[in-house]
Image (spheres, grey):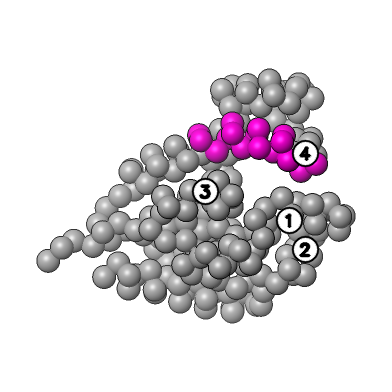
Amino acid sequence: MARPRVALVALTGGIATGKTHCLNRFAELGARTISADHLARDVVAPGTPGLEAVARRFGPDVLDADGALNRARLAAIIFADPDARRDLEAIVHPAVYAAIREWAERERMPGAILIADIPLLYETGREQDFDAVIVAACQPARQLQRVMARDGLSESEARQRIASQLPLEEKTRRADYVIDTSGSVEDTDRAIRQVWDALRTRQG
């Protein structure tokens, strides 16, 4: 009998659509997980080539007094300027995907399900790197409310950040599995369990 293969799965969605909650629940169910957002922070940590490249492109004002990246200042720049955002992504994304590949190789064992939370999966055109894609989505009004509450943004600022990503309806159309996070935590957790069971069945 053939041994169960490894499944490499991407989890994506929109800003504030519940990806982190989904990733944590998948980890509790037995998946090996990693977050591209956490990797992106490592890529621009003090002393890294990534941070040096960011400072060269955006200037010393994006650094704090201790030399660390001032994320609020950088965010104000990139969400107001699509070219600036693309320049930042060109610095960060290649290193993040390289780190995900290295992680996947380390974690590979028969029957394992590896899930990487990658917010900009479709925007970077890397969905073909994965065996399946899960999208965490919610109703637009709910997403807007969450972004404003979570990040302390005005409605116009929140809409600007949402608009910087591929529309959720396009992401859900292209997904293999969709988890609707609009309802209660219990409803979301049931949907996560259903996707987990489907992934396990797909593993054979």
Quarter placement of the N terminus: bottom left
For mark 3, does the 10 Å Cα neighbourhood hold few (<14), some (14 to 19), or many (20 or more) residues? few
* Earlier sequence position, callout 4 versus callout 3: 4
Distance from the alpha carbon under mark 4 to that under mark 2: 21 Å
* Earlier sequence position, callout 1 versus callout 2: 2
Residue at mark 4:
81
Quarter placement of the C terminus: bottom left
Residue under the point 86% across and 58% down: 155
Pointers 4 and 3 in contact (CB under 8 A)?
Answer: no
Left or right of 22 in this view: 55: right
Q: Which of marks 1 and 4 is in front?
A: 4
Specify the segment rendered in magenta: 79-95
For mark 2, does the 10 Å Cα neighbourhood hold few (<14), some (14 to 19), or many (20 or more) residues? many
Tag 4: residue type?
A: Asp
Residue at mark 2:
144
For mark 1, does the 10 Å Cα neighbourhood hold few (<14), some (14 to 19), or many (20 or more) residues? many
User: Does 50 lie within the magenta span?
Assistant: no
* Dominant secondary structure of the residues highlighted in magenta in the image: helix
x, y percentage for residue 173?
56, 68
Residue at mark 3:
125
Residue at mark 1:
162
Q: Does residue 19 appear in this view?
A: no
